[in-house]
Image (cartoon, rainbow, N blue to C red):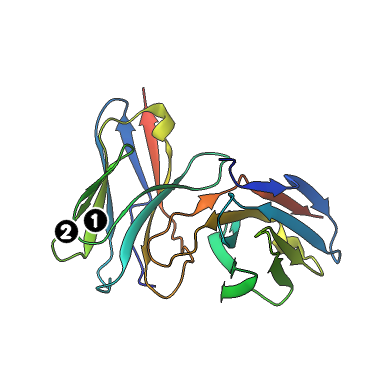
Amino acid sequence: KAGVTQTPRYLIKTRGQQVTLSCSPISGHRSVSWYQQTPGQGLQFLFEYFSETQRNKGNFPGRFSGRQFSNSRSEMNVSTLELGDSALYLCASSAGRPSTDTQYFGPGTRLTVL
Amino acid sequence: DAKTTQPNSMESNEEEPVHLPCNHSTISGTDYIHWYRQLPSQGPEYVIHGLTSNVNNRMASLAIAEDRKSSTLILHRATLRDAAVYYCILRGQAGTALIFGKGTTLSVSS
């Protein structure tokens, strides 16, 4: 099976712009979760989509949003970029069962905001 | 989700066993204990998980205390490739989110 893919791998934006990141889950997986990783805050959960619906949400401002398509591919959007949004954005796919399912992570998108 | 406490860092020599501890004194009866690790420049990867009984897989073993307030991830023979940040995570029935702490940075020397 192909793994989780994320595009683009690297991105440079300036403050105030918006950005869209894409994630293609493992075939058959219906859940896609997004995480932000920074040196200061570590790995933080952004949100999870399951069957095109947001099922869980972390503690991030409304500038961070996402969606999931019928083929389970997911996009994450950040509007009005701030310097502090510079981070590695990881997506993970899973079958979507709480408590026990394994999450498979992609390689991440490295976003730099100038 | 309940919180976990792990040492910031640990060191090991190649070919030796490694015991990575995790304290989770506020664990609830339905929380599963998961371990993930993150190798340099990669996304996290699943290692093992368990509920009450000790668990083994090809990567590691998970020893869970009888009162479930602590657990230990055991790498039976450390290799250089095992150098990573190891995260101990509790997952309840409410959702699928992984709530990462700081983890333990494992260094392996040859």
Left or right placement of residue A88 versus residue A113 in this view: left
Q: Quadrant of residue A34?
A: bottom right
Q: Is residue B60 left or right of residue A109?
A: left
Q: What count of labels does the image hold?
A: 2
Task: For the residues labelled 2 and 1, say whether their Cβ atoms are less than 8 Å apart.
Answer: yes
Find residue A76 and report its horizontal and vertical position in percent.
Answer: 71, 63
Q: Badge 1 sits on which subunit?
A: B
Image height of B81 relative to A2, above or below: above
Question: Counting other residues with Cα less than 10 Å from the Cα at mark 1, is it few (<14), some (14-19), or many (20 or more)?
Answer: many
Mark 1 lies on a secondary structure that is strand
Give the residue type that dot 1 points to: Ser
Q: Give x and y (percent) for residue B22.
A: 29, 56
Residue shown at 31% from the left, 64% from the top: B32
Quadrant of the rendered image containing residue B69:
bottom left
Residue depicted at 65% across the width and 46% down the height: A5
Give how far across and how far down residue A63 sits, in percent.
74, 73
Quarter of the image for residue A21 reads: bottom right
Closer to the N terminus: mark 2 or mark 1? 2
Q: Which mark is residue A100?
A: none
Q: A64 and B95: which one is in front?
A: B95
Q: Chain of mark 2?
A: B
* Helix, strand or loop for disc 2: loop
Please name the amino acid that badge 2 sits on. Answer: Ala
Q: Nearer the viewer, residue B41 or B53?
A: B53
Q: Quadrant of the N terminus of chain A?
A: top right
Return the mark for residue B71.
1
Q: Which mark is residue B65?
A: 2
